[in-house]
Image: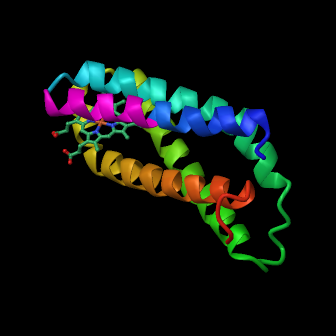
């Protein structure tokens, strides 16, 4: 059985996915300020989940020996999720500093990479949760 905090974190990841989807919807509609603000919320929620739950759990693993697929999933999830969060932080901070929408548009390649890494990390996170709490065996 999962710890309640792991369950809360698991549910939170889907809430964040919903927030990301709303952000992409605003982008589709050309409402870029709403898009940026929604992505800011996703980045902040992810940072909270990272510091409160994922980082303490991540450092409890011994990655010096990668002797199980679960560890490989955990390490890959951590690395890709960490990069996505850093890129997300960069995008919202850069927007906050420069304020001009034109400068955001120039960063759309970074946005594509961020969303891609975020989604891969999310899938690996679901796999990790299922593996850690006995739903599947990996
Ligand atoms: C976690 C942070 C963010 C993610 C994951 C993200 C994701 C995306 C994605 C996937 C696109 C579509 C790219 C394309 O059309 O090829 C996009 C477009 C765009 N984003 Fe973001 N975004 C983020 C933050 C921001 C911020 C902070 C701003 C500033 C307001 C912003 C402004 C824009 C603009 C203006 C476009 C349209 C670019 C264009 O089509 O010309 N984004 N974003």
Say above or below: 44 vs 17. above
Q: Tell me: 31 left or right of 34.
A: left
Residue found 55% across the figure and 27% down from its top: 44
Residue found 58% across the figure and 59% down from its top: 127
**Which quadrant would residue 5 be assigned to in this image?**
top right
Residue 21 in magenta stretch: yes
Residue 85 in magenta stretch: no
**Which quadrant would residue 61 be assigned to in this image?**
bottom right
Say above or below: 52 vs 99. below
Q: Tell me: 8 left or right of 66.
A: left
Q: Can residue 68 be seen in the rendering of this structure?
A: yes
Instruction: Write down which quadrant ligand 1 falls in.
Output: top left
Residue found 79% across the figure and 80% down from its top: 67
Q: Nearer the viewer, residue 116 or 127?
A: 127
Say above or below: 90 vs 59. above
**Which quadrant would residue 100 be assigned to in this image?**
top left
Name the spot of residue 16 as percent of width and height, x first: 47, 33
Say above or below: 74 vs 111. below
Q: Nearer the viewer, residue 81 or 124?
A: 124
Over which residues does the magenta segment extend?
17-29
What's the image's color scheme?
Answer: rainbow
Name the spot of residue 59 as percent of width and height, x first: 82, 53
Total labels drawn: 0
Q: Quadrant of the C terminus?
A: bottom right
Residue found 38% across the figure and 48% down from its top: 115
Name the spot of residue 70 as percent of width and height, x first: 70, 68
Q: Tell me: 119 left or right of 24.
A: right
Q: Can residue 98 be seen in the rendering of this structure?
A: no
Q: Nearer the viewer, residue 75 or 95?
A: 75
Q: Residue furthest left?
A: 29
Secondary structure, magenta segment, majority class: helix
């Amino acid at each position: 059985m999962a710890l309640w905090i792991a369950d809360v974190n698991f549910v939170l990841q889907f809430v964040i996915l919903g927030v990301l989807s709303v952000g992409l919807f605003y982008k589709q509609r050309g409402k870029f300020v709403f898009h940026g603000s929604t992505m800011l919320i996703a980045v902040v929620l992810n940072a909270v989940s990272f510091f409160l739950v994922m980082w303490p759990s991540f450092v409890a693993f011994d990655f010096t020996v990668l002797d199980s697929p679960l560890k490989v999933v955990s390490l890959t999830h951590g690395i890709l999720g960490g990069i996505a969060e850093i890129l997300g932080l960069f995008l919202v901070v850069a927007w906050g500093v420069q304020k001009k929408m034109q400068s955001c548009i120039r960063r759309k390649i970074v946005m594509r990479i961020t969303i891609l890494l975020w989604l891969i990390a999310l899938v690996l996170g679901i796999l990790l949760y299922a593996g850690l709490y006995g739903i599947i065996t990996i």
